[in-house]
Image (cartoon, rainbow, N blue to C red):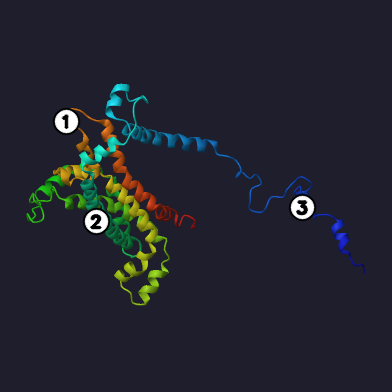
Amino acid sequence: MSIAHPTDAAAAGPPADARQRGSGPGKTVPRPGRPANNKQGKRHYGTHVFLIVMAAIWLVPLGWAIFTALRPKADTDKYGYFSTGGAFNFDNFTQAWTQGGFAKLFWNSVLITVPSVFLILFFASMMAFAVSRVSWKFNITLLIMFTAGNLLPPQVLAAPLFEMFKHFELPYAFSDSGNLLNTYISVIAVDTAFQIGFVTFVLSNYMKALSPELTEAALVDGAGVWRQYWDIILPLCRPALAAMGTLEVIFIYNDFFWPLLFIQTGDRLPVTTAINNLQGQFLSNYNLIAAGAMITAIPALIIYLLLQRHFVAGLTLGSSKG
């Protein structure tokens, strides 16, 4: 009986199947389940060029608005809009803030935006829970109806809503017009109704990704539907609620159409609609309007920067799930 020495196996070289795969000097054996040609190191020049062009298209009008806001109108009239001559200062911002009454206008925007966002998140989260966590035969039907409502242009309902609010009588203690027109309630109601569908669709998809054992265990313990929604599911949806809240604040704050339609008193308009007050009857000072537009964009930018972490987390959470 012969005993093989360990050095004999080493001298024999690699097995036959390894030699057939072409292992040798200067060659690497691809790992199982990974392609031989690794394309991760290649640069996507086309994607980078496209993103740079899109960023330039978005930033050029913004930069031009800032450039116009910093120039006095007299220098613009003298040298032209496409020139760099003249002085640059913040006089237009000061004049726009004083002439436009932005302190009052910002408060009007707060009175419309904050209640609208809270109502949207509250009602949309309840509806999303009903169509995603409760088993009944109208789940898909209701979700389709809420989603289809977003496809309807708001301008189609402008005349019917105006007539309906006009004939909806209210005590003069709540409305000096005796109806829903010229009140914040009308704008809040319409903004809430039009945004609930989109938020319901997003939150329902988020709630579907949560484990069904959560509500099943709560049901076994005797928790009702409200307890399951308020104490179990809703706390787990905080990232999604933060993301939707950030979007809705920006959407409703920037809304121009509905306040212009339902509010007739100038001192009740939100800031985005009241920029129109900076325009003269016979002459438009575009430098002043540009400064007012920059002032209007500051709160939305601050809100986005403060909630950016929650916004990104809400959009990307669950993206790695299979």
In front here: 155 or 253? 253
Q: What numbered label is drawn on residue 115?
A: 2
* Amino acid at dot 1: Gln
Residue lying farthest bottom?
Answer: 221
Q: Is residue 201 visible?
A: no
Q: Quadrant of the N terminus?
A: bottom right
In front here: 256 or 189? 256
| Residue drawn at 32 percent across, 67 percent down | 230
Dots 3 and 2: beta carbons under 8 Å?
no
* Amino acid at dot 3: Ala
Query: Which element is circle 3 on?
Result: helix
Query: Which element is circle 1 on?
Result: loop
In x, y percent, where is residue 72?
29, 30
Q: Earlier in the sequence, mark 3 or mark 2?
A: 3
Marks 3 and 1, how far apart in space?
86 Å
Marks 3 and 2, how far apart in space?
70 Å
Instruction: Give the number of the mark in front: 2 or 1.
Output: 1
- Left of 317 or right of it: where is 244? left
Q: What numbered label is drawn on residue 18?
A: 3
Q: What numbered label is drawn on residue 281?
A: 1
- Left of 7 or right of it: where is 60? left
In x, y percent, where is residue 293?
29, 39
* Amino acid at dot 2: Pro
Query: Which element is circle 2 on?
Result: helix
- Left of 160 or right of it: where is 46? right
Marks 2 and 1, how far apart in space?
34 Å
| Residue drawn at 31 percent across, 34 percent down | 69
Q: How many marks?
A: 3
| Residue drawn at 34 percent across, 52 percent down | 246
